[in-house]
Every structure is written in C-alpha cells, then in structure tokens.
Amino acid sequence: MPTDRMKRGLAAVLLLASMSALGGCASTVADLPGVGVPTDAPARPKEAGGYLPVHDLPPDRSEQAMKPAEQAKIEAELVAARDRQASTGAQNSAGK
C-alpha cells in the first residue's frame, strides 16, 4: 500500500474519531447553566416528555391580528400585482 494512501486513511480515521469525541461533549456543554442560553428562556423540564404538547394553545390575542381595512387593502394590492404579471406574461408570450 502506498505511503500517501496510508497517511490519508489515517488522517480520515483520526478526523472521524475526533468528531465523534467532540460530538459527545456537545450535549454536556449545552446542559451547563448559563452557556448559550438566553436569560429570558424558560427553564428546561427535569424529565423530557414523551410526546409534544399538542393541546397547549397560545393565549388568545387582545386585538385582531389585522384589521379588515388593512386586509382588504393588501388583498387589492395582491390582485393588482397578479393582474400586472398576467398581462406582462401575455405580452411576452405574444411577442415571441
């Protein structure tokens, strides 16, 4: 076996071994207090749940997400943009 291939193979094995060793440290570093966790983040539960909280809904909004007048304005702008694109596309296909 040529020496160059052996060196490449050894380098690849060492690289994979170091990646797996460092990958094992990632979970323990993430669990340290104050490391990469925002100050306003909720505390982690002591025991991880088996299922996602499907029925936990966010609280109701105090006001509407968008007023009907704003929604009508945006819909009109979208219709106008669609019509402009359709007319531009028709002109481009007719000109070919």
Image: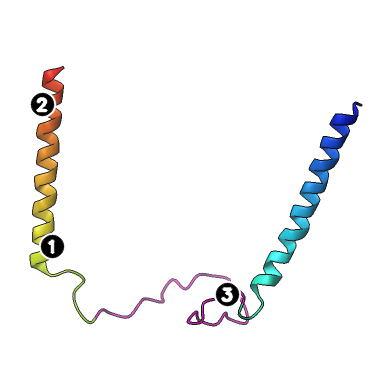
Which residue bears the numbered disc 2?
Answer: 91
Question: Do callouts 1 and 2 mark residues in contact (Cβ within 8 Å)?
Answer: no
Residue shown at 9% from the left, 60% from the top: 72
Q: Residues within 10 Å of mark 3 (few under 14, many from 20)?
A: few
Q: Residues within 10 Å of mark 2 (few under 14, many from 20)?
A: few
Up/down of 8 relative to 62, above or below: above
Q: Which mark is drawn over residue 49?
A: 3
The range drawn in magenta is 35-61
Which residue bears the numbered disc 1?
Answer: 71
Residue shown at 19% from the left, 79% from the top: 63
Q: Name which of mark 1 and mark 3 comes first in the sequence.
A: 3
Residue furthest to the top in view is 96
Is 50 within the magenta?
yes
Q: Name which of mark 3 and mark 2 comes first in the sequence.
A: 3
Residue 69's x, y, as percent?
Answer: 7, 66
Residue toward you, 10 or 20: 10
Residue toward you, 5 or 23: 5
